[in-house]
Image: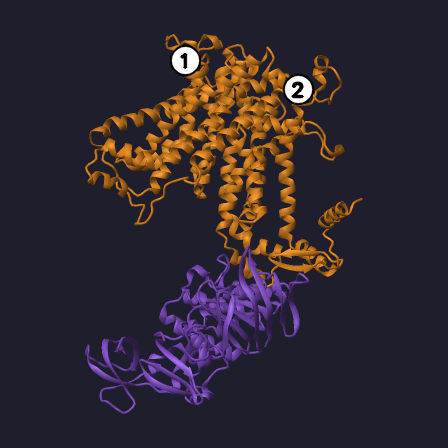
Chain colours: A orange, B purple
Amino acid sequence: MSKKVRKRVRKYITIFFRVRKKGRIHVKRGKIRYPITKERLKNQFLNVVRNPFNMIVFFSLIILFCLIVIPLLQMVASTFTAAKSEIRRIGGKPGDFTLYYWRYILLSNMSQSTLWDPLKNSLIVGLFTVLVSVPLGSVLGWLIVRSDIPGKKLLGMLVVIPYMIPSWCKALSWLAVFRNERSGALGFLAGLGLQIPDWLAYGPIAIVLCMSLHYYAFSYINVSSALRSINSELEEMGEICGATKPQILKSITLPLVLPSILSSIIMTLSKSIGTYGVAANLGNRIGYYTLATKMKVFISDGPRNVGYAMSLVLIGLAALIIFSNQRIIGVRKSYATIGGKGGRSTDMKLGKAKKPLMAFLVLFLFLAMVMPMFILVMETFQVTTGNGYGPENLTLYNWIGTVDQAQKYTSYPGIFQNDEFGRSLWNTVRLTFIGSLITALCGQFLGYISTRGRGRWYGSLTEQLVFIPYLMSGVAFSTMYFAMFSRPHLGGLIPSLYGTFTLIVLTSVVKHFPFASRSGTANMMQISTELEEAATINGASFWQRMRKIVLPLAKNGFVSGFMLTFISIAKELDLIIIMMDKKTQTMSYLAFTYSQEGYNQMADAISVCVLTFILVCYIIANRFGADIGKSW
Amino acid sequence: MSRIELININKYYGDNHVLKDLTLTIEDGDFMTLLGPSGCGKTTTLRVISGLERPQGGVMLIDGKEAINAEKAFYLEPSKRGLNLVFQSYALWPHMTVFENIAFGLKIQKLPKAEVTRRVKDALKMMRIDEFEGRYPNELSGGQQQRVAIARAVASNPRLLLLDEPLSNLDARLRIDMRSELLRLHRDLGTTIIYVTHDQVEALTMSTRIALFKAGELSQVSTPVELYMNPTDLQAADFIGNPRINFLEGRAEMESGGLRVRSPLGEHLFPKEDMTDEAVPQGEFPVVVAVRPEQIRIETKETPGCLPVTVYANQPAGSETLVSLQAGKSDFLAKQLGLVHYKINQQLYVHIPPEKINIYNAESTRLLKRARLDAADLPS
């Protein structure tokens, strides 16, 4: 070996092993170099290990990684792995690497109906939902915050109520109004003798309108809180300068709320593209599939890996949308007033426009809330739907009738007599209680790690990991978990959770991590680090600190976080639909199934029960100070 | 009751070198004040001593035993250092009553219940807040919360008491009351106290010694009197003293008999005994003449050795009067006890005792000539 080469080799060995001529390894620490000695290493190790906080962070990160990153990677891997059921077509043996599934959805002659058409439909539905709901919500927000419309407090409360109603419930009430002969039973309008065309009752128009009446709440809440934080003096200045009201709206108000409008567009778009319940209820029966609904078909009927591939497409789409949100809006999340007293607000006089706008509001509330619910509730009392409300058509059978009392041919007794309903009710209660308890606890923990680790690597890493489930729509996320946990892992250490209640709880918990963690973070920020430092100085260990200081102070925030997660899980259909079967079904699943099978009144009755359950929870949550605006 | 030695302490926050090679000894029984403007590192020093922060370099000894050795990565836990800390924000636990707040540390030590009660009641009595025993912190005023925070800190009989700007959240009158409370506390307990503040009046009135900080380094460590009469550099001189010390430009030259200084105050020859150990430049060099407002004696009639001045402004402030004076192109401020009314542009004569003047090297900003301390200046 030449001298030059030997020199270079030695240099690399030195760099690799960090060994210097004197035989001691030096480490740089904040610009101070210390020799590594046994004692130093021992002390450093003890410093890390003796602090329970470090251990908690360590294990939390590992668990988060296993619950979030690994399932995603696993699902990606599945889409490239041949499954037993497709071996006939692919050749080779199960477990082989294959591009079959991706070719199936992208390049085969099945692709059009499998991927491209549903994708197109998803995008269309998403786009139009945005076009309808964002202006609707923004205008409502402006009316209630900025104008002098009467009855603001009441209106403010009423406007948010439609969001409490699960979107699949709204789909059922839509059907209650617009159903035609195609479904085998008539809806309210058809029952009055009106000819309801298919394109109105089902398909994209129905889906868009239904979803708009649900997701307008995002725009409403975003825009109204933006308006509340902006000083009205900005608009008053415009008036003094001589601008007319439309001019002020266009040049002053609109630009100021633009960031929140953009943010609502993004949220609405990503949510509506991934929605399952509404699209299934209103689209499946006429063969109008979106990406989410088509995906479910593949997961239930196979080939499953095709479904996983579609789910990845969905996730990619959502990630694209949300990251472009970061790009477009960037740091300017909202315009808060600079300087001055800020926050004072006088209402803009509507003058001549007041009566028409009031009428619009009332009409909106009537259409979005009152009428659908009324018709839904009434349908539960009808023998034959669409047959009117004459006494001969009204019955309590759907609620309390037994099979031998059946007037029409039906195989199910009234829901309160129905064992299946009883079981689904029990499952719902079980799921919401256990799920939200675990989620809320985890959320507080994650919040603690995020706040105490603010600015450190583990704090930011935790926040990033926890955000990932938010990117995925309910069906995509549950598909991922279904993929991962349908088989045993670690040689049986983690058994297959296929068909178990545990899987559903696990999925609900992790999907709600982003929300719970945000709530936990806000709660923990209220507890100043100095309170904990004072305890440390007075001799408290980590666990004593948690028990005596942090936990008592975190209690109230925990309760409100718990209640809001509770409500969110109770409403849930999209998230759990993939994994449910007869044994584990919740009320929302049962309602959906009945509706698909044509037992509309039963489905409606179950929805009414779910609604009551949710409303009661909201009232209780409000007593504890929970804020509805934070509940998604 | 505890002797603290900080040796070459270095603390970084990221790339920010907050404490630079800090070496400081706090003797047993001292009331040591860490004084300096915001951001100079005094609170960081306190937190390093308490164990809430870990320095990257240096050693700390408590009573001769190692509590910090950065090289060995050894950091003794805060609870084992025999100290307690009063936070600037008091950090009272809102969900506990006053009694429970004070009893917290004692219960952690697993003291018997009777002992806990006794000690809590003693602490309450010492801080004169007996009647607030069952109240919650949010039911107390700022001053009362302050007392609870101090009671909590002293209840555990610490050998070292640390206070982080405890009076900064109180109004002016309450501050003066609390200062006397803290002084009595120091005398009664005999504990070593380390006190952090940016208020020099607090530092001067309460401490046995003051450590003046400047951007992470120690500028001067001395008794309050010494710091007040002989600040080691211009920055320290400017920081200490209310109203501010007067600075005048002058020129000086070292002669065989001493330092000859020419300034708007006239010509002075200062004897060699009054000079500090600082090196004096050769030849003539610029100096800053520093004199405190209260050292300037104002007379209405001309006397030998006085300086004629005119009145620029007159501010009677109740117990004292601040008079802005002009001599030639130089302005300075004089402080006179009681209410005096001088007219603007009135001709006056001032007498400044030369032994009370400080001379600073204008370029190096260091003290060259000390002021002499009378028996009246020193504490008895």
Separation of residues labelled 1 and 2 (CA atoms): 40 Å
Tell me where residue A59 appears, x and y as whole percent.
65, 45
Name which of mark 1 and mark 2 comes first in the sequence.
2
Front in this rendered view, residue A224 or A340: A340
Q: Please tell me whether residue A191 is drawn above or below residue B104 in the rendered image.
A: above
Residue under label 1:
A200
Dot 2 falls on a residue whose secondary structure is: loop
Chain bearing tag 2 is A
Q: Callout 2, which amino acid?
A: Leu
Residue under label 2:
A99
Tell me where residue B29 appears, x and y as whole percent.
55, 78
Chain bearing tag 1 is A
Residue at 56% of width from left, 30% of height from top? Answer: A428
Front in this rendered view, residue B192 or A457: A457
Residue A604 in view, yes or no: yes
Tell me where residue A238 appears, x and y as whole percent.
23, 39
- B251 sits to left or right of A146: right
Residue at 68% of width from left, 53% of height from top? Answer: A49
Dot 1 falls on a residue whose secondary structure is: helix
Q: Quadrant of residue A427?
A: top right
